Image (cartoon, rainbow, N blue to C red):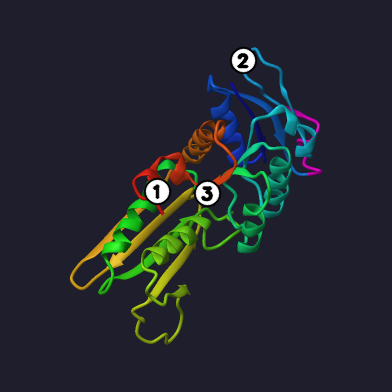
Amino acid sequence: MIRLVITGIAGKMGSAILKLALADSEIIVTGAIEAKNHPMINKTVYGGEGKASIAVVDDLSRIIDTCDVVIDFTDPGATLEHFRIAAANKKAIIVGSTGISDGDLVKIKGMEGARAVISPNMSVGMNLMFDAVEKLARILKEGYDIEIVEMHHRLKKDAPSGTAIKLMEVIEAAQPERGWMEIFGRKGMTGERHKDEIGILALRGGDVVGEHTVMFAGIGERLEITHRAYSRENFAQGAILAAKWIANKGIGIYTMKDVLGLNLFHPE
């Protein structure tokens, strides 16, 4: 049995992860975290049929000894603190939070004893898209303009999405010889498109869970690859899969490519 603590338990992702974890025979949820002063603090959440309710607390260090793995979908500041606590106590952590700065990522990856899976998108389908986009970008070079369009619900706080940024990084790494010019939306007399531009457009509205499209626009043809998320359950499923995978792994910073075995076929 994998003992699991879930942070942000009252949020949409925390709730989705709890639901799947309680239905999984290989997992037992031993703790729940929310932000200080949250209305759920000192209350409980359902612990599963025949099991005790789970108390919600505001300090991971109080319950870190009860778990094997932490799953964190919170905000960048909280994630950094949760990561520090997990690493210091030699516990694994799954990080699905978005909006983490490059500086904080450097701090995270440099923490002694860290054992983590970090991904801006835990969806299995989305991570297969990362892999497919990398392959396409290695082949469709000169003569193909690359653009990224993403759309999310009206409540999303960061833009562009962490997934869109990851797609951009995958493309840039696949064609390192190009002097990439990153364009975040266009307005006014921008002039002709530079051959090394890579554009990202962020759309916001309604209750869209997440949609990402990468376009490879050539002369006389355009190839598009799109991933649409219709519920948060697919992200939760990926996080649960990652928690099971890392439970018996050694110290290291991993990605969903490792979890899905994609690095076995495309070593970096």
Part of the protein shown in magenta: 36-44
Crowding around mark 3 (Cα neighbors within 10 Å: few <14, some 14 to 19, many 20+) is many
Amino acid under label 1? Arg
Lateral position of residue 55 relative to residue 224, left or right: right
Q: Residue 172 at what x, y percent from top left?
A: 41, 67
Callout 1: SS: strand
Residue at 80%, 34% (x, y): give it: 62
Q: Which is nearer the N-term, disc 3 or disc 2?
A: 2
Q: Report the Cα–Cα distance between label 1 and label 2.
A: 33 Å
The numbered mark at residue 119 is 3
Q: Nearer the viewer, mark 1 or mark 3?
A: 3
Q: Which residue is mark 2?
A: 49
The amino acid type found where label 3 is placed reads Ser
Q: Which residue lies at the image location 65% right of the left edge and 54% below the top edge?
A: 110
Query: Marks 1/3: CA distance?
Result: 17 Å
Label 1 crowd bin: few (<14), some (14–19), many (20+), radius 10 Å: some
Does 150 lie within the magenta span? no
Tag 3 near tag 2, CB within 8 Å: no
111 relative position to 202: left or right = right
